[in-house]
Image (cartoon, rainbow, N blue to C red):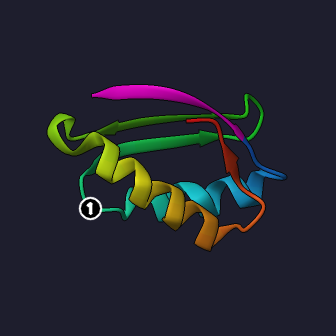
Amino acid sequence: MKKKYAIEVDCANCAQKVEDAINKVEGVTSATVSFVQQKLIIEAEDDRFDEIMANVVKAAKKAESDFEIEL
């Protein structure tokens, strides 16, 4: 499943740190964080998507505490 989310990230470097952290989450096929567009595009396993997204939010917050996502 592929979904887009509105996010809030402060800088391009922060966006890269968050993207790297999200791509390491088990079940994530691919993730792209755009600082310019303030969007997260994520592709993950369909059957565990909600569980994976919970782990994505945790990983993103750990990488950058100011990161916000609209689920």
Q: What residue is drawn where x is 69% and y is 67%?
A: 64
Q: From the viewer's perspective, is residue 49 above or below residue 22? A: above
Q: Quadrant of the N terminus?
A: top left
Q: Which residues are magenta?
A: 1-7
Q: What residue is drawn where x is 30% and y is 52%?
A: 51
Q: Residue furthest bottom?
A: 62
- Who is closer to the viewer here, 9 or 20? 9
Q: Residue furthest left?
A: 47
The magenta stretch spans residue 2? yes
Instruction: Tell me where residue 29 sits by quadrant.
Output: top left
Query: Identity of the amino acid at label 1?
Result: Glu
Q: Residues within 10 Å of mark 1 (few under 14, many from 20)?
A: few
Question: Percent x, y for residue 15?
Answer: 68, 53
**Image side of residue 25 versus residue 19, left or right:** left
Instruction: Tell me where residue 62 sits by quadrant.
Output: bottom right
Q: To which residue does mark 1 refer?
A: 26
Q: From the viewer's perspective, is residue 28 above or below residue 39? A: below
